[in-house]
Amino acid sequence: MRKTKKPIDTQIDEYMDYCTYTRRMSAMTIVSKQHTYAHFVIGSKCHDIQNLDNAAFNRWIKYQTKKGVSARTINTRIAHIMSMLRYHREMGLNMPIKLPLIKKLKEEPARRVFYSATQIEKALEYADELAWLLIKICFDAGLRISELRNMRLDNLSGRRIKFVGKGRKSREAYMNRETYERLQKWISENDITDSLWVNHRGHKYSVDELRIRMRKPFYKAGLTDFYPHALRHSFGTDIQKKGASLLEMQQMLGHSNAETTQRYIHGLDGQLENLFAKYKDA
């Protein structure tokens, strides 16, 4: 039986077309928005944004909080929803919701989690082949999870990965030889013809599905603070400890400025006492 399409489905589709073809937003932003709107429909129980009020919006925020979603992620999702609501209001759609009453949540200080190469190797011991590849490619190449999720055969040229990253910037990164060989085996055994990460139905895994697959090996290894972006921080810290300069790190991470790169420098974390003793005779 064909599923009946709700008004909000059409409203979301219209806005996504605007984002894709008029605003020409990046693939990562489009995926993030789609993921947010799917959760919004479930959590708010809204079937038509012409009936959306602040009580329903707050119910959606409460739903996420109970699920353990971080304030930072909820605030990003709030921004996505508000952008869609403003678009439809500009297009003449009447909505009872009062946008000025929507407030973002107070955020905790950003977590800075990173792992050593030894810790990652320990986690990999508990990983199945898919999780192994997901974790290892992120650590080898410093990819964001959205960049990882969007990987296709066309992005690969030997061990090189060419892709469009954050801010629609063309980037390239490299995986090591072992990772490359295991990826080629994965592609062959799973008859991959386009997207690299597809389930048994041939559908691309969502970001959440990939996150869950990646998290399990770390939990089994006793590293319960895992989140995917920690692998990007681990990549940055690893190359720093191996002697990469700030400029080299900036280029390898694909950052526009060095200030952003400095957030990924954790190689000296916890070593200030020793440094002062070494250089200032403290």
Image (tube, rainbow, N blue to C red):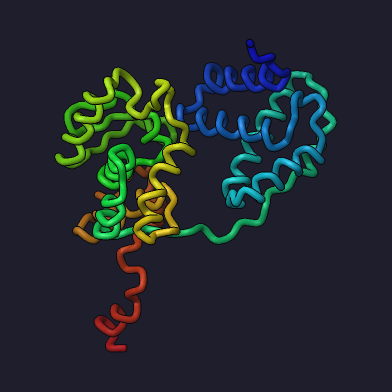
- Image quarter where the N terminus lies is top right
Instruction: Determine the residue located farthest toward the front in the rendered image.
Output: 1
Residue 275 vertical position relative to residue 67 in the rendered view, above or below:
below
- Foreground: 149 or 182? 182
Visible in this render: residue 8?
Answer: yes
Query: Picture quarter containing residue 114?
Result: bottom left
- Image quarter where the C terminus lies is bottom left
Visible in this render: residue 89?
Answer: no
Residue at image point 65% right, 45% down:
64
Residue 222 vertical position relative to residue 144 in the rendered view, above or below:
below
Residue at image point 20% right, 30% down:
185
- Foreground: 212 or 39? 212
Residue 30 vertical position relative to residue 14 in the rendered view, above or below:
below
**Residue 26's x, y, as percent?**
46, 28
- Foreground: 268 or 190? 190
**Residue 172's x, y, as percent?**
27, 34
**Residue 134's x, y, as percent?**
33, 40
